[in-house]
Image (cartoon, rainbow, N blue to C red):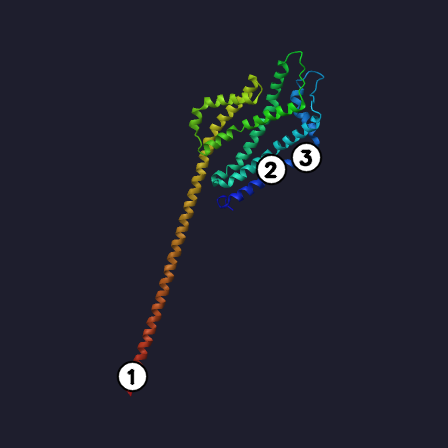
Amino acid sequence: MNAGDMTFIQHLVELRDKLLRSVVAILIIFIGIFPFANEVYSFIAAPIVGVLPTDTNIIAIGVISPFLTPLKMALIFAVYLAMPYLLYQLWSFIAPALYKHEKQLVIPLVVSSTILFYAGLLFSFYIVFPVIFGFLASIGPSIVDFTPDIQYYLDFVLKVSFAFGVAFEVPIATILLIMFGVTTVETLRKNRPYVIIGAFALGMILTPPDVISQTLIAIPMWLLFEAGLILAPLIKTRSRATKKDEENKKQNNNYKDSEVNDQEEDSSDSELEAEIDKIDDEFAKMDDEFADYIRKLDEEDKNK
């Protein structure tokens, strides 16, 4: 069934199915990860453990934090691992409303979105976190022991890593805005200074209050924005070419259909003319037979 033929309730049912599939995928991954939650948390905590003083570990202030925190971490980690499937479900829900040449971009966009999201996570984990935690561990007074809480650390890591994952989606957002006509490449280039200021402002909000971490998120966002400006015209040109080919193909099909219709009409006219000629021949034959019959009657009258 086409998207245009579906009712509002059918759209809601389809959305429910997509959400249920996404939840089931997350739960399946979570069930597989949960037995190894402590090992995974130890891996996630490696950046901050490396900067802690000797013989110092992360502490747990809450009574049930040693259980709930790895549980929460395993659930969020399952969401991160299921991200390709979640993005696919999102695009598959949107795809029926798109044109055919736009649907061809769904798979490349899903793949590139997934790669960029994971690239943001890896960038934050291996580059940003060591810098941030090194800065935080060295800036405090010497009389204060730097012993982060297990829950607060996880919340901080999830917030910053997710922010970097979303920030690395800037090229996709730029390409989509240009493709759907919301803005143009020239407008974005003209407003480049505002984009750069916005990137640094977003970095100020999402990262700790130090220049290094703000710069570490702002510069990649700016560079990815420039990458989007470079790729968007290429993709849009290809999309236009594909759309033009589809229109030409449609016109050719319409022309062929019209030729077939003309041929069918000509064939129908020929058949009709043949039937008319046949009827005329039958009437002529009947006229001849009637004339012969009249002639015979006249001859019989004369003989009498």
Judge whether 101 appears above or below 275 on screen. above
Q: Residues within 10 Å of mark 1 (few under 14, many from 20)?
A: few
Which quadrant of the figure has residue 282?
A: bottom left
Q: Residue at x 60, y 39 (%)?
A: 20
Q: Dot 2 corresponds to which residue?
A: 22
User: Looking at the picture, how far across and down is residue 284, in whole percent?
Assistant: 32, 71
Is there any visible trace of residue 221 in the rendered image? yes
Q: Residues within 10 Å of mark 2 (few under 14, many from 20)?
A: many
Measure the C-alpha gap from mark 2 to mark 3: 16 Å
Is there any visible trace of residue 219 in the rendered image? no
Q: Earlier in the sequence, mark 1 or mark 2?
A: 2
Judge whether 302 appears above or below 130 on screen. below
Q: Which mark is residue 299?
A: 1
User: Looking at the picture, how far across and down is residue 196, in whole percent?
Assistant: 49, 22
Q: Is residue 189 left or right of residue 25?
A: left
Which quadrant of the figure has residue 25?
A: top right
Near-viewer residue (88 or 148): 148
The amino acid beneath tag 2 is: Ser
Placement of the C terminus among the 4 image quadrants? bottom left
Measure the C-alpha gap from mark 1 to mark 3: 113 Å
Near-viewer residue (8 or 53): 8
Q: Residue at x 67, y 25 (%)?
A: 43
Judge whether 130 appears above or below 1 on screen. above
Task: Name the element at disc 1.
Answer: helix
Marks 1/3 in contact by CB < 8 Å: the verdict is no
Q: Earlier in the sequence, mark 1 or mark 3?
A: 3
User: Looking at the picture, how far across and down is residue 47, in whole percent?
Assistant: 65, 21
Q: Which mark is residue 184?
A: none
Task: Name the element at disc 2.
Answer: helix
Q: Dot 3 corresponds to which residue?
A: 32
